[in-house]
Image: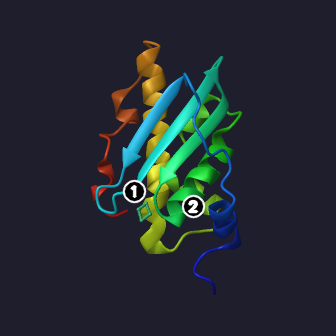
Amino acid sequence: MALYSEKVMDHFRHPRNVGVIENASGVGEVGNAKCGDIMTMYLQIENDIITDVKFETFGCGSAIASSSMATELIKGKPVSEALQLTNKAVAEALDGLPAHKLHCSVLAEEAIKSALKDYYDKNGIAYDAALFPAENCCDHDH
Ligand code: FES
């Protein structure tokens, strides 16, 4: 069996929603201390709906595929749904990642959460701090 699914290869070779949103509603940047990979997520939010999302990932193929898939999963969705996106859901949508690459999908979940937190902070929206575990939690294995 190939190490990577066709979906992973497709999103790695043709990543969706790459780029930057100027004056985004929320921006989140996270990094994995171990591998040094960095991901930035930009969200445009109108009336509680994520109307646009773009990302930049300086990282491995799995991180690029994960961020690309994650943007597709949250585009057009309400903020509350995006908040619930887990790295597991991202990996499943990619038809799986090798076990030692699962942490790459964690980066996508964290980048989205970090961008949503930025949106809440910028707009003075109250939230439960427990929704946003300390950033850079990725220096351990998942
Ligand atoms: Fe760093 Fe994949 S090896 S995110």
Q: Which of these two is toward me, 127 or 103?
A: 103
Three-letter amino acid code at the position of disc 1? Asp
Q: Residue furthest bottom?
A: 1
Work out which quarter of the rendered image holds the N terminus and state it: bottom right
How many neighbours does mark 2 have within 10 angstroms: few (below 14), some (14-19), or many (20 or more)? many
Disc on res. 21: none
Disc on res. 91: 2
Above-or-below relation of 98 to 26:
below
User: Assess mark 1: CB under 8 A from ligand 1?
Assistant: yes
Report the residue at 38% width, 26% height from top: 128
Q: Which of these two is toward me, 81 or 140?
A: 140
Q: Which residue corresponds to mark 1?
A: 37
Which image quadrant shows ligand 1? bottom left
Q: Are the residues tagged 2 and 1 within 8 Å (C-beta)?
A: no
User: How was this image coloured?
Assistant: rainbow
How many neighbours does mark 1 have within 10 angstroms: few (below 14), some (14-19), or many (20 or more)? some
Is residue 110 visible from the viewing direction of this image? yes
Is residue 83 visible from the viewing direction of this image? no
Report the residue at 46% width, 37% height from top: 113
Above-or-below relation of 28 to 126:
below
Label 2, label 1: how far apart the Cα atoms are = 18 Å
Residue 39 lies, in percent from the top left, at: 46, 48
Three-letter amino acid code at the position of disc 2? Ala
Residue 94 lies, in percent from the top left, at: 64, 63
Q: Earlier in the sequence, mark 2 or mark 1?
A: 1
Q: Is residue 142 left or right of residue 4?
A: left
Work out which quarter of the rendered image holds the C terminus and state it: bottom left
Residue 118 lies, in percent from the top left, at: 43, 26
